[in-house]
Image: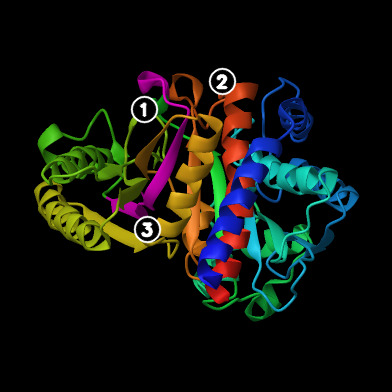
């Protein structure tokens, strides 16, 4: 009888909350525009890459908003911004949510920023409606998501020491960048949290593809996030005079690199599934028309929901590289960047709560896999996770044309807000 009463009470709570508590659509868009001002160059392009002056200024702006919303704010030793809101029961584990505000060079204003602003909006609405959750809440703004989930990986103990010497888009190494934003790379061990430290972690993001827009669907409730692995590749041949060296007597590193690009495409397409592999960067240091390239530097990135498939694809690429090196009389070296993220599945319970929230607002939804990496996948090491996507106009992201409408942003944010409230009560009932 007691369990029935608890269930009935929860249903009435859920219906009342979902009917009354909504985000402020105009405030969300206003803050998108305000944050976009930080890091703009003289051409009006967004350059808020991690550890840059724009990033530092944007972080200060956001921390000020967090403090005004009553959060207890600090920067952890990894450089992540953490804002805490007390719950009725301090013995309970926090429900956390957030994203990042750094962007790729010449990026857009919605990737990461929308998720961070939505996290803050949840706190604002709870304050305005005088709602105190049973669980403590945390808003987490991770540093350098675009550089390989650096901040979230530090929080889970998954940031390898070798990664600290990698250069970021700002020109600083990750270690230097952590110092620049108020962290301490020598004390990263003190940032690490363990499995069970979070009751849940939620994130919302723009889709970064056209699926929702093409189908006319409001949101996607994500079922899993692909793993990502990155390598730097160096192709070494011999630089020589482009006019006097016969075609059959060359060690052309660029020819070898070109063959390898095609080989990557062929290998990845030889597998069934939705896996992807990309060579997104090629540099020829000699860079002159009268020099046969003696060296080429290039990237390789692979993504899939199966870590095993990524390993198999890479092994096949290595075999093809050996053949190409032999044919072209060159040497091809691979260096793993130690920035790999593992495939991650979202919590079924959290997905169900997101569906409940969506249906209560009449918001249409589908299930989807995420082909892009997000901080939420690292947070799965600390507790159950959930991820929501909203449409990106024309599927554009990592581009100044990136856009999601105020209505689209509000629908997704309402799902996030009410999922937090539903989880707060359902997790409490479970503990009872």
Residue at image point 49% right, 59% down: 385
Main SS of the magenta segment? strand
Say few, some or many: other residues with alpha carbon within 10 Å of mark 3 (under 14 / 14 to 19 / 20 or more): some
From the image, state whether disc 3 or disc 2 is nearer to you: 3
Q: Nearer the viewer, residue 31 or 366?
A: 366
Residue 15: in magenta span: no
Please give the residue where the numbered disc 1 appears in the rendered image.
Answer: 211
The residues colored magenta run 213-236
User: What mark, if any, has residue 358 been given in the picture?
Assistant: none
Give residue 72's position: percent from left, percent from top.
84, 62
Q: Which of marks 1 and 2 is nearer the N terminus?
A: 1
The reply to whether residue 347 is visible in this rendering is: no
Rendered image quadrant of residue 355: top left
Say few, some or many: other residues with alpha carbon within 10 Å of mark 2 (under 14 / 14 to 19 / 20 or more): some
Instruction: Report helix, strand or loop for mark 1.
Output: helix
Residue at image point 52% right, 32% down: 398
- Marks 1 and 3 sit apart, C-alpha to C-alpha, by 20 Å
Please give the residue where the numbered disc 2 appears in the rendered image.
Answer: 401
Left or right, residue 430 beside residue 83: left
Q: In this view, does 192 lie above or below 334?
A: below
Residue at image point 68% right, 80% down: 190
Q: Which of marks 3 and 2 is nearer the N terminus?
A: 3
- Marks 3 and 2 sit apart, C-alpha to C-alpha, by 30 Å
Instruction: Report helix, strand or loop for mark 3.
Output: strand
The reply to whether residue 292 is visible in this rendering is: yes
Please give the residue where the numbered disc 3 appears in the rendered image.
Answer: 345
Tag 1 and tag 3, C-beta contact below 8 Å: no
Q: Nearer the viewer, residue 138 or 116?
A: 138
Left or right, residue 364 beside residue 329: right
Instruction: Report helix, strand or loop for mark 2.
Output: loop
């Amino acid at each position: 009888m007691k369990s029935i009463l608890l269930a009935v009470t929860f249903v009435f709570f859920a219906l009342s909350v979902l009917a009354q508590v909504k985000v402020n659509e105009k405030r969300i868009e206003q803050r998108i525009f305000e944050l976009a001002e930080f890091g703009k160059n003289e051409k009006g392009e967004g350059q808020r890459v991690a550890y840059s002056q724009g990033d530092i200024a944007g972080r200060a702006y956001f921390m000020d908003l967090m403090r005004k919303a009553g959060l207890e704010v600090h920067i952890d030793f990894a450089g992540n911004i953490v804002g805490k809101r007390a719950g009725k029961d301090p013995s309970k584990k926090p429900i956390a949510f957030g994203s990042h505000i750094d962007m790729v060079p010449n990026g857009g204003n919605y990737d990461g920023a929308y998720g961070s602003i939505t996290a803050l909006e949840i706190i604002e609405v709870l304050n305005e409606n005088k709602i105190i959750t049973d669980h403590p809440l945390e808003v987490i703004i991770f540093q350098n998501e675009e550089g390989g989930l650096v901040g979230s990986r530090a929080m889970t103990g998954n940031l390898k020491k070798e990664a600290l010497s990698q250069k970021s888009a700002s020109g600083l190494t990750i270690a230097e960048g952590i110092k620049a934003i108020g962290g301490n790379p020598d004390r990263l061990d003190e940032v690490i949290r363990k499995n069970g430290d979070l009751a849940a972690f939620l994130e919302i993001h723009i889709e970064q593809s056209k699926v929702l827009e093409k189908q006319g669907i409001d949101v996607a409730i994500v079922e899993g996030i692909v793993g990502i692995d990155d390598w730097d590749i160096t192709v070494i041949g011999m630089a020589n005079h482009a006019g006097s060296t016969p075609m059959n007597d060359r060690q052309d590193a660029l020819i070898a690199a070109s063959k390898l690009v095609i080989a990557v495409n062929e290998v990845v397409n030889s597998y069934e599934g939705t896996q992807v592999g990309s060579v997104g960067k090629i540099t020829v240091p000699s860079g002159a028309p009268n020099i046969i390239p003696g060296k080429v530097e290039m990237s390789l990135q692979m993504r899939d929901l199966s870590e095993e498939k990524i390993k198999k694809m890479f092994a096949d690429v290595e075999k093809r590289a050996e053949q190409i090196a032999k044919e072209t009389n060159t040497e091809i070296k691979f260096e793993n960047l130690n920035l790999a993220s593992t495939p991650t599945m979202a919590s079924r319970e959290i997905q169900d709560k997101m569906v409940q929230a969506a249906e209560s607002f009449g918001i249409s939804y589908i299930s989807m896999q995420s082909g892009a990496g997000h901080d939420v996948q690292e947070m799965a090491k600390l507790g159950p996770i959930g991820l929501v996507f909203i449409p990106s106009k024309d599927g554009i992201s990592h581009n100044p044309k990136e856009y999601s409408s105020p209505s689209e942003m509000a629908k997704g944010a309402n799902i996030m807000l009410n999922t937090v409230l539903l989880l707060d009560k359902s997790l409490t009932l479970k503990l009872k």
